[in-house]
Image: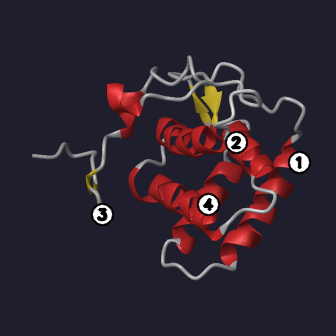
Amino acid sequence: MQSPTSTTTINGPAQDTHSYDGHLKDRLVNVTSTTATKNDKINSFNDLKNKIGSITSPLVVTALKAIDLIINSIGTSNYDPTNNVHADDLLYLIIDKLKDPSIDVLMDVIIQLSDIITSGPCPQGRCTRLAQIYFSLYDDLTTSPTQYPNLNEF
């Protein structure tokens, strides 16, 4: 039987994002966009909203809500203390890699953002879902401050 905090995806039961609490921090050691101001982030997030808004998918509405949640939480409740990372920093760095994304990559982003609203709006849920995108985009370790996550170890 599923725990009350888990959901079902098309691939079966989703793992509770809190099972990752404290397990991603070693892989996210240098994840910060300290040179980005709040306005830099908001402008970047709004650009992403425009890109996402042009896609036809039932998940777009919840993905846009997730971006708004992150925007409205900059400097307050985006921080995941268990993994020592901010959701707005992760999203900002993700967008930096999405200069000319394929539709497949954008759909992956939309799915994870949508999941933030439907099954994990807490800071840990935001950061865990964004970390999945981050890891997939920063897979070249020469440009990544992280290592590949072994998500099967949880």
| Image disc number at residue 105 | 4
Whole-percent x, y for residue 77 in the image: 61, 38
Residue occupying the point 77% across, 31% down: 143
Compared to residue 25, the image places residue 107 above or below, namely below
Q: In 3D space, how far apart are the residues under numbered discs 2 and 4 (Cα atoms)?
A: 19 Å
- Secondary structure, mark 3, is loop
- The crowd level at tag 2 (other Cα within 10 Å; few <14, some 14-19, many 20+) is many
Q: Earlier in the sequence, mark 3 or mark 1?
A: 3
Query: To which residue does mark 1 refer?
Result: 40
Viewer-closest of 152 and 32: 152
Mark nearest the camera among 4 and 3 is 4
| Image disc number at residue 10 | 3
Q: Quadrant of the C terminus?
A: top left
- Secondary structure, mark 1, is helix
Q: Earlier in the sequence, mark 2 or mark 4?
A: 2
Compared to residue 74, the image places residue 81 above or below, namely above
Residue type pointed to by label 3:
Ile
Residue occupying the point 88% across, 38% down: 36
Q: In 3D space, how far apart are the residues under numbered discs 2 and 3 (Cα atoms)?
A: 27 Å
Mark nearest the camera among 1 and 4 is 4
Whole-percent x, y for residue 27 in the image: 57, 22
Pointer 1 and pointer 4: residues touching (CB < 8 Å)? no
Q: Is residue 52 left or right of residue 131?
A: right
- The crowd level at tag 3 (other Cα within 10 Å; few <14, some 14-19, many 20+) is few
Residue type pointed to by label 2:
Asp
- The crowd level at tag 1 (other Cα within 10 Å; few <14, some 14-19, many 20+) is few
Query: To which residue does mark 2 refer?
Result: 88
Whole-percent x, y for residue 72 in the image: 69, 51
Q: Is residue 77 visible?
A: no
- The crowd level at tag 4 (other Cα within 10 Å; few <14, some 14-19, many 20+) is some
Viewer-closest of 130 and 145: 145
Mark nearest the camera among 3 and 1 is 3
